[in-house]
Amino acid sequence: MADGEPDSTIKKKDRYAALRYPEFRWYLSMRFFFTFAYQMQAVIIGYYIYKLTGLKSALGYIGLTEAVPAICIALYGGYVADKSEKKRMMLLIFSTMWLASLVLLLVTMPQARQYISSGTELFFIYAMIFVVGLGRGFYGPTAFTIMARIIPREEYQNSSIWNSSTWQFASVVGPMVGGFLLAWAGVTVTFTVILIFISISLVSILFLNRHPAEYIPKESISESLKEGWRFYKSSRMLMGAQTLDLFAVLFGGVVAVLPVFAKDILHVGEIGFGMMRAADSVGAVITMFVLTRYSPMGKPWRNLLIAVTGFGLSIICFGLSNNFYWSLFFLFTLGAFDSVSMVIRSTIMQMLIPDKMRGRVSAVNSMFINSSNEIGAFESGMAAQYLGTIPSVLFGGGMTLLIVTLTWLNTKKLVPLKVEEIHQPREVEPAQG
């Protein structure tokens, strides 16, 4: 059960059920303002580095620099999340993120060019991206364990929708504000705003309750991590959903090359870039609100395959478009389909993972899924550099459709499963000792 009682009686089909828990609202505040700042920072860094270097491959290296530490530290981050007090962990993580953003502010200020060269500036930028990657390796598992502790099981689906909606809404506002501030006020003001929003996230954490560890390790770190991995792969539904998303995101990282589309193909400048960067998140947010009333969990596996198929088709259509408004539309549909996939995967994870293993199992998810965004960005940047921007996007969309087809052929038995049946792997497929 969650700590504390909700503000009022929660009805079974109340679309605002999770929001009636005060601690969950503070959790969403933390997540919103951090995601807002993180998305702003991603937009600014991508555009700034491309402008500084003129290299498409430099965009790919941004993703790689963040993904490598996130992947390498993820399993250990999950282990630490399971055995540590959660509130203290979040304060340490966010303080590190704040310091990294402060360094980015200082090295990108016009005055800094009097003291450091462009090469040194680039080094510091990539170094701070690396630090952010380390922080993410701890942030994902810790945030996942907190959310499960503040919301009762019967509200997991509703909380997953609001959690994802908050992330997506911040992903809409962040890139738009980032693009507009970059165009009208410059890099220094933009990084200052980023620091302010990370500070608000830190304040929100202070209002969370303490959540001591339920897991006290009695085995070695390696055995503890292996236990999390064994549970992860023991559930066919859990493993299948995350593997499908891994490859879809890996080949569908079109967002990484949006600076090239904005500057060199569609010629829409910084404001147009901000609109493009936000379009997929606008589609996702609108879809999320629809999902609060119309659940995609009736037949989750079937709906997941449909959603990822729509995701791949949207990528291909975007690559073929040479009209700015059609491009915005296809980015919108891309985000809409991705949001359906996100809700299904998040709900499955919340339902299947035991409390004492949430950190370690979600760390496996973070290692293979969350960092696939950055690896996908690297793949997209490299493919754009050597294949050409448009061919690389079409290749990514085609590979996404191929992955969906292969997944469907290998998981036909999961297609007719109803939501009630996804509870079963937790009981019949326990982690092996």
Image (cartoon, rainbow, N blue to C red):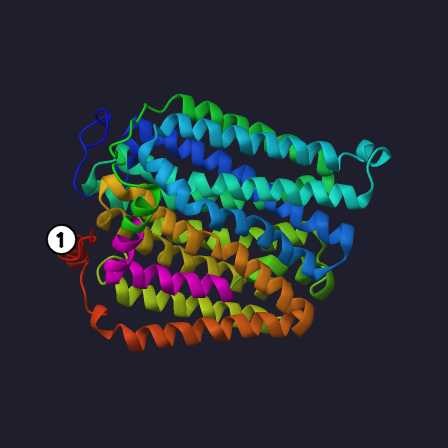
Residue in view at x 30 percent, y 44 percent: 224
Q: Position of residue 366 (x, y in %)?
A: 41, 50
Q: In this view, does 386 lie to the left or right of 320?
A: right
Q: Is residue 344 left or right of residue 257?
A: left
Q: Is residue 208 visible?
A: yes
Does the magenta-highlighted stretch encompass residue 18? no
Figure quadrant of the N terminus:
top left
Q: Position of residue 330 (x, y in %)?
A: 52, 64
Residue in view at x 31 percent, y 55 percent: 344
Residue in view at x 72 percent, y 59 percent: 263
Does the magenta-highlighted stretch encompass residue 240? yes
Magenta stretch: helix, strand or loop mostly: helix
Badge 1: few (under 14), some or many (20 or more) residues near its Cα, within 10 Å?
Answer: few
Residue labelled with disc 1: 427
SS type, badge 1: helix
The residue stretch that appears in magenta:
228-251
Q: Is residue 271 left or right of residue 27?
A: right
Q: Where is residue 324 in the image (x, y as percent from the top left)?
A: 63, 63
Relative depth, front residue between 22 and 107: 107
Relative depth, front residue between 200 and 280: 200
Type of the residue with mark 1:
Glu
Name, please, the residue furthest toward the front.
Answer: 220
Locate residue 266: give its quadrant. Answer: bottom right
Residue in view at x 83 percent, y 41 percent: 117
Q: Position of residue 35 (x, y in %)?
A: 50, 40
Above or below, 126 against 310 in this view is: above
Q: Is residue 176 visible?
A: no
